[in-house]
Structures are given as structure tokens and as C-alpha cells.
Amino acid sequence: MRSVLIAAVILSGCAAPQLATVNIESPFDATQAKLQTQDGLNSIKGSGFLRQRGGGVVTCAGSEVVLIPATYYARERIAHLYGTGGINRHRLNPTFVPDPPEYRTFTKKTRCDAQGNFMFERVADGDFFVTTGVHWQVGGTNQGGPIMSRARVAGGETINIVISGD
């Protein structure tokens, strides 16, 4: 009986995910972020989707898309959330320390259209992270999640990216 109780306590600890605190070493550079969110001559267009296990494709239709300047602070934060891939496997947002409020203000936002396409116009030269979400339900269980891709623009170009979490 005692071993069953110990096993239950151990398993219950595994079943209840804890929110982590992540310390970001790089300071947030508001000047750099502000420069990258000023109007420029570039455009970033693209689409977002995830493939279901059965092969079906679900797009980011209706989801917010965020263009984040790739400052050193943002690179650390994004690396923690997405690693080297494009899917946020954490499902829970950790607490970032520091978490400057300006981080969220120096972004550009749009929405995916009904087909899962989006566009950012008047983008400054630079490196960016583009994030969105793809969500659906199977048997009452939420599936999908946040996805991310990188983009680099310069010199008045228009690039096309696909955010698929691969």
C-alpha cells in the first residue's frame, strides 16, 4: 500500500506541469527594437500551417501574427520557447526575468486571412522572428500551438515565408 501511495505522489508531480522562470542574460535594447519597427521599404508575406498526424493541414486562419525584431534579448527568449525548431513545444508560457513591457510594444501585428496567409508591409531592414498559432480540437482535446520562423529583409525586397514548425 505504501509503494502505491509513493507512486501516486511521484506521478501526480509529473502530471502537473510547473511554470518555469527563465532568466534572460541579454539586456533589452529598446533603441534597436524601435529602429526595426519603424517603417521601411520591405514586405514579408507568408502563410502558417501545421500538418495533423493523419495528414490533414490546418492553417493559422484568424490567428494573430507577430513580427518581432531579432534583438539579442528576443533571440534568447525565442530560443528558449522554440529551440532550433519552429514549434513551441512548452505549451505553457514561462515567466521571463527580466520581462520589460517595451518588448511587446516594439512589434508589428497582423492576422492570417481565411486561407492562412498574412502580410507585413513597410518593414525596416533587419532580422525578425515571425510567430503565429495554429489550433484545432480532436475529441475535445486542444491540438497544435504556437509556431515561429525567421525572416531577414533588406533593400526594399518582398520575401515569402512559410511558418510550418518544421
Image (tube, grey):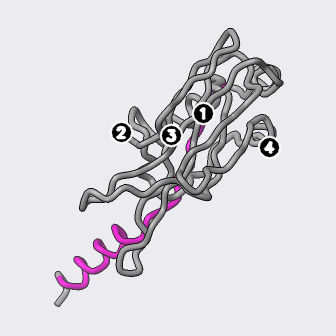
Badge nearest the viewer, 3 or 4: 3
Task: Find the residue positioned furthest to the top.
Answer: 155
Badge nearest the viewer, 4 or 1: 1
Range covered by the magenta-colored residues: 4-26
Indicate which disc, 3 or 4, sits on the residue closer to the N terminus: 4
Distance Cα–Cα, label 3 vs label 4: 21 Å
Q: Nearer the viewer, residue 6 or 107?
A: 107
How would you rate the neighbour count of disc 1 (Cα within 10 Å): few for under 14, some for 14-19, many for 20 or more? some
What residue do we see at 44% from left, 53% from top? Answer: 90
Label 1: state its secondary structure: strand
Which kind of residue does numbered mark 3 sit on?
Met
Circle 3 sits on which residue?
148
Circle 1 sits on which residue?
45
Residue 15, position in %: x, y?
A: 36, 71
Residue 143, position in %: x, y?
A: 41, 65
Distance Cα–Cα, label 4 vs label 1: 27 Å
Distance Cα–Cα, label 2 vs label 1: 18 Å
Answer whether labels 2 and 3 touch (C-beta < 8 Å). no
Badge nearest the viewer, 1 or 3: 1
Residue 24 part of the magenta segment: yes
Residue 114, position in %: x, y?
A: 58, 57
What residue do we see at 65% from left, 52% from top? Answer: 64
Indicate which disc, 2 or 4, sits on the residue closer to the N terminus: 4
Circle 4 sits on which residue?
101
Circle 2 sits on which residue?
166
Which kind of residue does numbered mark 2 sit on?
Asp
Answer whether labels 3 and 4 touch (C-beta < 8 Å). no
Q: Above or below — where is 18 with respect to 113?
A: below
